[in-house]
Image: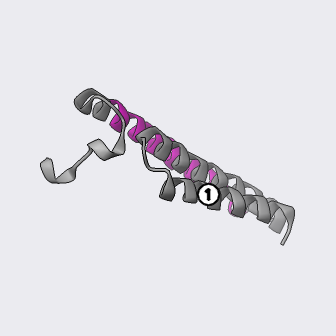
Amino acid sequence: MTLFHLSFYSAFTLSSLGLAFHRTHLISALLCLESMMLSMYIALSMWPIQMQSSSSALLPILMLTFSACEAGTGLALLVASTRTHGSDHLHNFNLLQC
């Protein structure tokens, strides 16, 4: 396992563990999702360089586009939930009351 693979796996694992165990604020969950997307983007960007091919150069750009859409949607939900509930604590959200 190279240093690149180790850093990618550790960044992805730490961000997924942060998403799983540190669920108090919505903004921290969004940051963990963004770090997962960033580590996946870096891995997809470096993969064609390691394989010495240019055939999959469009995939990182597509991933970055979906990541930007996910970030915009997450921030819109953060603003809407903060306006309606008064804070971004995840324990305030109850789907059964909707």
Q: Residue at x 56, y 59 (%)?
A: 17
Position of residue 87 relative to residue 24, above or below, is above
Q: Which is nearer the eye, 84 or 44?
A: 84
The majority secondary structure of the magenta stretch comes to helix
The colour scheme applied to this rendered structure is: one colour
Badge 1 density bin: few <14, some 14–19, many ≥20, Cα 10 Å: few
Q: Position of residue 71 (x, y in %)?
A: 47, 40
Position of residue 35 relative to residue 17, above or below, is above
Check residue 65 for magenta coloring: yes
Q: Quadrant of residue 5?
A: bottom right
Q: Residue at x 41, y 35 (%)?
A: 75
Q: Which residues are magenta?
A: 55-79
Point out the image quarter for the N terminus.
Answer: bottom right
Q: Residue at x 77, y 57 (%)?
A: 46
Which residue in the structure is indicated by mark 1?
A: 59
Amino acid type assigned to the residue bearing label 1 in the image: Leu
In the image, farthest residue toward the left: 97
Left or right, 87 with respect to 13, comes to: left
Asked whether residue 48 appears in the rendered view, the answer is no
Position of residue 86 relative to residue 37, above or below, is above
Circle count: 1
